[in-house]
């Protein structure tokens, strides 16, 4: 077992072990697992706060009760067994059940040795969810009108993000063990962009989806939808109207009652295993790019009664270019743009729930007892994070495995990321002080999308570090196995090796808002031959592959969510990645 220290020393808190009834890695085969003992984390103070301490005493991850031994691989409900597959090649395509994706053994970092399947022991198993993008589709600040210049700026499936996320929770709950080892799943981690507009309504929905409860995915008028999909504008799919809009011309159906069904109350069972949270740029900033929390005028527009729904292609192009080229990090140009187009806006019902939430409010919401679910309290975050103004932390996954959650958002604005110098030093220190434990690092951004080094307004003198800097730190430690992230909405697995033989895998997972809407099970095993294997297995939601346009139930809408995302105009066809980015065995040398 690795030696641990308290957060004041910038390492992991000491934890109490469960009594293990049998030998083997973390006694998963014995079914003991860990008892969840969430403790009230101590606030980072003094030197620890100055150094950017991420959390107080670490929470203990726990697993659901293991099935009776011997454990057996559990592939039901995974993409090894079956995958939603389009029927036809043109027009609006329906989905059916197709053959599963095979597992690919990747030897980029180490040669797999014969007989390892009989020798290996499980170290840990967990689930990654990423880029849920729960969307308040009636929010006044949304950029739907950019669709006049870029078809990707609005998706026909966006009103159903809550339904899709609940179906994903249902799928994870139905997994009775890990796909390769059969070990119990220890926890789930969301790697950011849990919300879309940085709206309080979306944050409440996300926390309820994960922890369980009832959700009404509607803001504004409690009786009626008020947004672009009943605007009569041909730019958007008008599901309940006879108007032949641009999407219906491509084969999208007319669905009477769709919008009423989309804003009806739904229920999430909540995850039945502990879950942790990592912050993404859409969780940190309005629209995922504007450092505008101090702009009262933009906040007033967010909760107000006016919404812009249409814009000329030329004006939309200018606004989109300013956003993409990082010319408006604080949203000042965007605020002035909206005020200049006030007369073109349509009336909607004002709603205070659409207000943006600050990073401190994001932390406080996670710590709210109403959203504890199966824990841990704070879902990785602690009162120490609130006191220090940080959103990164470390936690113990198993006897000899730790997890590290980074905050890669840049508070200065724009959607690409970076980390502050203090956080990078904390990462290096945490890995060094737990060098006898394997480490899995979580973040929202990938190594290639951490290129934004604009200063943090709260720490203007602190240097910002790029993805290359993070790679250098991770590569300097022998205990790092994987860096797990999202942001790019695409499955991609990248090997990272140094000349001295130190190596790890970067695992990027597709979003749950764009097709093919996936999450990933990750298993860590010791092959007992000088190598380790990281297994990745993709899972879809529990919704049926085949849709029924007459079924507007919660489950029916979740199925429709997947099919609409397949058919979204301009939807990319490469987001599933290559076979070596999907279901894999990633081999690497031990230590």
Image: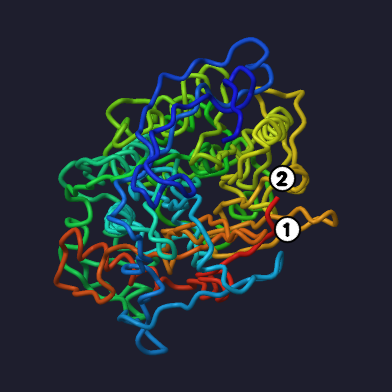
- Identified at 26% across, 66% down, the residue is 543
Residue 241 can be seen, yes or no: yes
Label 2 environment density (alpha carbons within 10 Å; few <14, some 14–19, many ≥20): many
Front-most of residues 371 and 195: 371
Residue labelled with disc 1: 496
Secondary structure under tag 2 reads: helix
Q: Is 544 on the left-hand or right-hand side of 235?
A: left
Cα separation between marks 1 and 2: 10 Å
Mark 1 and mark 2 lie on one chain; the one further toward the N terminus is 2
Q: Where's residue 53, x and y in %?
A: 61, 23
Of the numbered discs in the image, which one, if any, rests on residue 351?
A: none
Secondary structure under tag 1 reads: strand
Q: Quadrant of residue 207?
A: top left
Q: Where's residue 18, x and y in %?
A: 39, 33
- Identified at 43% across, 31% down, the residue is 17
Q: Is 41 on the left-hand or right-hand side of 475?
A: left
- Identified at 51% across, 34% down, the residue is 395
Residue 129 can be seen, yes or no: no
Q: Is 45 on the left-hand or right-hand side of 192?
A: right
- CB within 8 Å, label 1 to label 2: yes
Residue labelled with disc 2: 474
Q: Is 460 on the left-hand or right-hand side of 578?
A: right
- Identified at 73% across, 24% down, the residue is 460
Whether residue 234 is situated above or below residue 209 in the rendered picture: below
């Amino acid at each position: 077992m690795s030696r641990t220290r308290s957060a004041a020393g910038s390492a992991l808190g000491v934890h109490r072990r469960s009594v293990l009834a049998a030998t083997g890695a973390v006694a998963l085969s014995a079914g003991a697992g860990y008892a969840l003992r969430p403790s009230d984390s101590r606030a980072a103070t003094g030197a620890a706060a100055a150094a950017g301490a991420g959390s107080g005493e670490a929470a203990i991850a726990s697993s659901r009760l293991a099935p009776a031994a011997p454990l057996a691989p559990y592939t039901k409900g995974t993409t090894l067994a079956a995958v939603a597959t389009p029927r036809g090649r043109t027009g609006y395509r329906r989905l059916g059940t197709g053959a599963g994706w095979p597992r690919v053994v990747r030897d980029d970092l180490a040669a797999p040795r014969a007989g390892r399947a009989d020798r290996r022991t499980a170290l840990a198993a967990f689930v990654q969810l990423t880029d849920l993008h729960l969307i308040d589709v009636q929010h006044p600040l949304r950029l739907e009108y950019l669709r006049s210049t870029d078809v990707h700026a609005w998706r026909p499936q966006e009103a159903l993000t809550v339904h899709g996320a609940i179906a994903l929770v249902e799928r994870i709950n139905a997994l009775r063990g890990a796909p390769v080892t059969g070990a119990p799943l220890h926890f789930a981690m969301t790697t950011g962009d849990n919300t879309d507009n940085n709206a309080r309504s979306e944050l409440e929905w996300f926390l309820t989806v994960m922890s369980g409860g009832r959700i009404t995915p509607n803001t504004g008028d409690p009786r009626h939808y008020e947004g672009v999909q009943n605007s009569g504008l041909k730019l958007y799919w008008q599901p309940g109207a006879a108007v032949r809009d641009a999407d219906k011309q491509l084969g999208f159906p007319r669905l009477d009652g769709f919008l009423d069904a989309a804003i009806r109350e739904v229920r999430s069972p909540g995850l039945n295993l502990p879950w942790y949270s990592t912050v993404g740029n859409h969780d940190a900033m309005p629209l995922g790019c504007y450092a505008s929390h101090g702009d009262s005028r933009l906040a007033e527009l967010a909760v107000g009664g006016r919404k812009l729904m249409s814009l000329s292609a030329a004006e939309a192009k200018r606004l989109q270019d300013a956003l993409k080229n990082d010319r408006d990090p604080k949203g000042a140009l965007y605020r002035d743009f909206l005020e200049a187009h006030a007369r073109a806006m349509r009336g909607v019902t004002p709603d205070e729930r659409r207000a943006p939430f600050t990073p401190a409010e994001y932390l406080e919401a996670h710590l709210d007892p109403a959203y504890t679910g199966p824990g841990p309290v704070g879902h990785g975050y602690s009162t120490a994070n609130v006191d220090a103004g940080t959103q990164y932390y470390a936690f113990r996954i198993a006897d000899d495995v730790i997890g590290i959650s980074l905050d890669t958002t840049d508070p200065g604005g724009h959607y690409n990321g970076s980390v502050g110098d203090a956080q990078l030093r904390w990462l290096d220190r945490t890995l060094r002080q737990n060098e006898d434990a394997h480490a899995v690092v979580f973040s929202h951004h990938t190594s290639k999308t951490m290129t934004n080094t604009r200063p943090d307004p709260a720490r203007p003198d602190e240097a910002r570090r790029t993805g290359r800097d993070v790679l250098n730190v991770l590569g300097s430690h022998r205990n790092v196995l994987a860096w797990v992230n999202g942001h790019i909405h695409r499955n991609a697995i990248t090997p990272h090796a140094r000349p001295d033989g130190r190596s790890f895998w970067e695992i990027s997972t597709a979003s749950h808002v764009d097709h093919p809407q996936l999450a990933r099970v990750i298993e860590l095993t010791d092959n007992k031959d000088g190598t380790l294997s990281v297994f990745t297995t993709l899972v879809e939601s529990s919704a049926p592959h085949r849709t029924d346009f007459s079924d507007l139930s919660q489950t029916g809408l979740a199925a429709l969510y997947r099919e609409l995302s397949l058919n979204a105009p301009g939807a990319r066809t490469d987001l599933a990645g290559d076979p070596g980015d999907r279901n894999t065995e990633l081999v690497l040398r031990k230590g």
